[in-house]
Image (tube, rainbow, N blue to C red):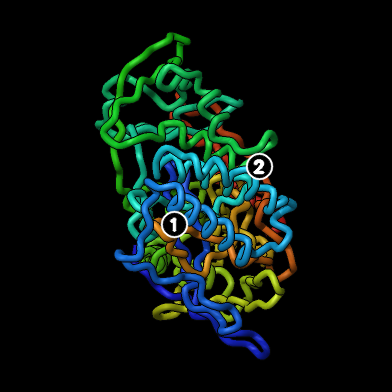
Amino acid sequence: MNEIGFKTIPRPGVTRAIIRIAIRRLPAVFALAALVIYSAPRSFPALTKPTTPSALVSTATRAGRLEVFDDTWATINDHYYDPKFRGLDWDTQRVTFRNEAAEAGSGRELYAVLRRMIGTLNDPHTRVFSPEDKFDWWRPRFISIGLGIREIDGLATVVKVERNSAPARAGILPGDVIDSVDGQPASSVVNQRLTTATPAAAERTRAFAAIFDGTAETLLELGWKDKHGNQRQAYFKRYWQLRELGLSVNKESGKYLIIEIDAFTKPIATSFARIVKEKLKRRRGLVIDLRNNGGGDAEAMAEIASSFLGAGVSLGEFSDRSGAGFGVFTGFLTAQPVAISVPVIVLTSERTASAAEILVAAVRRAKRATIIGTKTCGCVLAIRARHNLPDGGVLDVSELDYKTPTGEHLEGNGIQPDHEVLVNRKDLYAKRDAAIAYALSELTQSQNSPHR
């Protein structure tokens, strides 16, 4: 993904800032984006500290593991956006996990301890990566076996099968239920990835999406139940997969145009403007599908939002733990996009996150769209910079909170759609997209309404 800044339109008393949003692709189909502030007001001190190869500590030693642990805990303690740590006793977490970190048998075990400690915050944006697992926001990759998983009726359910993949050749279909992974019940694998007894919806989504996690090139033993209830089993190899995020316009339905946006990038914003100009002229309604959109470049998102809202419209405000903050506004990257005046429906899901949630909140607030689908992730915090750990690992810390122009917090709350449309196995087997069908029905009814 291209790194593109989001320059806010300055207003009196509002700090000018540059914002970028980074996408993290989790295993399977779930995506989560963290808002990242690379250039922020001077009142927010820089977080990243340089680490040279000669200064790297070794996690093969007890002292090295403790140095990495202490640095991780202290950085979160000093910079986390919420001084109350979302109601968690952060000092207690240090006592609880420090000895485990000291006694870890390897660097990999140490990072497993760090992730469990960070997981108690129940914040998907604050996360840690070992030196060998560093994540590139702009070239997202994830471990896969060729399947996308989602929780449906409490079960790990296949929602996507990669074309020509080994699972496709084995006959796995969207709608099949995963029973076991490497000999363990799928429910147990999910529970192992949960850090609290009552996890938030976003954490459950990540846990289900991550049930195939493991080391690349290793075999995974998978058990599943097909449409007819038959139990099946096979071995599949884990592999790294790069995903190209883009914009799909191959879904058209008569007088209505359907555009699916995977993420926000400058090329996607440019394509969106071109498609709207070329294809929307003879259409009487527009469906924007953000169900798999985990965020992206905030400037690109703002340009797309400008097609609905115009320029200079507030998209909300970010603030640090002291309350200091700055506002962000819509604006244009290139030429002014074509204004959209037809009825609009936006599709959402629990995978709609970060910048996508800001867009959804903005068009709803302006009464420019009807929201259909399921509740969004509730994952909207900001990371200003990456923190380099003493061994070469990397720590992301949520330093900035976000509020809508009306003062609402989306983090942990998400956005409830105007009309909820759930995904079920029957529709998956029938290859029926219930949310799209509902959206087209709504547009048709609005066209036929005598009040128009």
In screen coordinates, is 227 left or right of 271?
right
**Looking at the image, do the residues carrying marks 2 and 1 touch, with CB atoms under 8 Å apart?**
no
* Disc on the earlier residue, 2 or 1: 1
Q: Is residue 168 above or below residue 422?
A: above
Q: Which mark is residue 121?
A: none
Residue at x 52% of width, y 60% of height: 71
Tell me the quadrant of the picture where the N terminus can be found.
bottom left
Residue 336 picture location, percent across and down: 45, 79
- Secondary element at image label 2: loop
> Looking at this view, is 376 or 45 the one in front?
45
Local packing at callout 1 (Cα closer than 10 Å; few below 14, some 14-19, many 20+) is: many
Q: Secondary structure at mark 1?
A: strand
Residue at the limit of the structure toward the bottom, as seen here? 12
Residue at 58% across, 61% down: 74
Closer-to-camera residue (398/404) = 398
Q: Where residue 37 sits: x, y (%)?
A: 51, 71
Q: Which residue is mark 1?
A: 23
Question: What residue is disc 2 on?
Answer: 200
Determine the residue positioned at 66% across, 90% down. 12
The picture places residue 67, in percent across and down from the top left corner, at 48, 56
Q: Is residue 186 above or below residue 120?
A: above
Q: Please say whether residue 281 is visible from this viewpoint.
A: no
Q: CA distance from mark 2 to mark 1?
A: 20 Å
* Amino acid type shown at disc 2: Ala
